[in-house]
Image (tube, grey):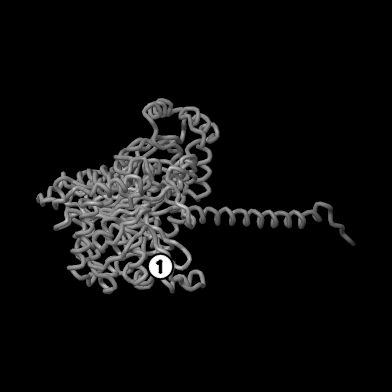
Amino acid sequence: MKFRSSRKDQAVPRLELRMAGLSVLIAVVLTIIAGRLYYLQVVQHQSLAELADRNRIRLRRLPALRGLVFDRHHRPLVDTVPSFDAVVVPEDTEDLSDTIERLEKLLGGSNIAVRLQQAEDDERPAYEPITVEEHLNWNQVVALETHQLELPGVSLQVTPRRHYLYGEMAAHLLGYVGEVTRNDLRHLVGYENGDQIGKFGLERGWENFLRGGAGGQEIEVDAVGRRLRLLREIPEQPGDGVVLTIDFDVQQAAEQALGPQSGALIAIDPNTGYIIAMASHPAFDPNIFTGGISPANWRRLMTDPSHPLENRVIQGIYAPGSTFKIVDSIAGLQDHTLTPSTTYNCPGGMWYGNREYRCWRKQGHGTLSLHRAIVESCDVYFYQVGERLGVDRIAEWAHALGLGYKTGIDLANEKTGIIPSSEWKRKRYGERWYPAETLSVAIGQGYVSVTPIQMAQVAAEVANGGIRYKPQFVKEVIAPDGSPVQSYPPVVERRLPLNPVDLDFIRDAMCDVVNGPGGTAHKAALPNIVVCGKTGTAQVVAEKQGVRIDEKNMSAAERDNGWFIAFAPKDHPRIAVAAIIEHGGHGGSAAAPGVRDVLEKFFALYPAGLPTTPSAAPAHPQIQADASDQRED
């Protein structure tokens, strides 16, 4: 007998199969869930706990107060003031677009969204505040505080702001600060987004002293990021102070001496190399860089044809004009191609080859020796001095005096200028040197170019007997409590083997440039101080052969640059100065009066003994009359 299985009996294996598959699926899902829980609870526990905590507890970085900057008498020039800034934490607001719109209406800003996006592009860590508006005025601060509930994620933050007390004064020396860049963050340790860093001048060079050390706060916040209470704090460490060698009063006198004219003036102590004043015009206000310069201000500075960001003291390259005759005189006396009694005749010009090289005084100076040639700045005399020396010996002595090289001052982008030689021309142009070119070099024209700080060093070397000091503008670094951290004593770079008798002769001649008959710098004279100096008038536009250009027919941009270098007093000099006025014309009338004002201020502050001014008979009437309608050198 056969038995048939029922349909019910046949369904049992299929049901068991389905139950087995379902069990496997449940096991897989539970395994995934368990794995995910393990990952979240164990592997990611620390980071997730921190993230959760950050919804309630925030770590706020406290930027350090930058160190103060003082003049030599500890009078503050740069300090730090509080700045009220609006900051946003995007994670604390549900509708960021609405918050941005409200905030822009409230503060009158329009770049908040841009700043937020820039911060995101810079890979800002989560919950890190983003500064969207800086330096809020009192009305903006009140508005932000009273509308706090309508602005989730927005808060007011007080941050230190660099403040340059006297605006443009000494701007090129002090420099400025700005926000760190991505490149800074890649290469520097201890900086974060939003930090300020020295970008230029002293602020850049002494950044490691001035910056200080950041601190921090652990604070509890509510759901929209408002501060509830302080949990823990690590105080910031203020930066060290920097004491300059600059004298505030003399610096002001230097700035006023330049006035609205483009140019530069530097005063140094010839016995130490310490800089007493350094002014470059036109200048800029470093305060506009604090917290980030606006695109409009940056565009204005970069497109200004007068180049206000250029430090003309160390970066301005100029033909030295007749101030270079001091170099010729030293070279000729030391090489014995020239003596104090050497005489040449100046009829108003000198023919060399097929060209006439003219003297600035059309009717000439007649026969004269070295002393009078320096005093009256005779071009024809120094053409012949240069011819006998040759360009290579001139170059060697110019280099020995520091020209053609950086002075070593601790400021970035210093220029070297050019001291030409036969080898220099061969390398530069692939051509030989022509003897006629030496004549132009001998009166500080042609290829030769210098910076004002180099010429100040030349004046100082003549004053102190041939010692070249490294120019320095920082006297010491001090801790916030006033204790010394580091000092900067004078640094002797070279002692030139100059004959003291020859130097005395040159000093006597420079003294009569200011005080003697026929001198070209009477406007620099002081009543009770013997000032020694040398004027220079450097052509900007070369005259054509046989044609004298009348200054009255020149445009302002075509006029000569006016130089004056000086030191005082004659015996035991205490200050050396170099000044240039761009397109100012005659050195004796353009640069000498400003130097006189600086010297007058200096000796009012630092009285010297009252040496008897050399008795100088009034200039010969004929010389005065002739010079009245001629170019002063």
Task: Identify the residue shown where x is 68% and y is 54%.
Answer: 22
Is any atom of residue 294 visible in this view?
Answer: yes
Left or right of 130? Residue 65 is left
Residue 101 position, x and y percent, is 53, 31
- Mark 1 lies on residue: 438
- Above or below 135: residue 185: below
Q: In this orientation, which residue lies closer to the viewer: 177 or 253?
A: 253
Q: In this orientation, which residue lies closer to the viewer: 57 or 405?
A: 405
Graded by Cα atoms within 10 Å as few (under 14), some (14 to 19) or many (20 or more), the crowding at tag 1 reads: many
Left or right of 238? Residue 572 is left
The number of numbered badges drawn on the structure is 1
Secondary structure at numbered mark 1: helix
Residue 228 position, x and y percent, is 35, 35
Q: In this orientation, which residue lies closer to the viewer: 17 or 498?
A: 498
Residue type marked 1: Thr
Task: Identify the residue shown where x is 37% and y is 73%.
Answer: 392
Is any atom of residue 80 visible in this view?
Answer: no
Check the image and name the residue furthest to the right. 1
Task: Identify the residue shown where x is 51% and y is 45%.
Answer: 118
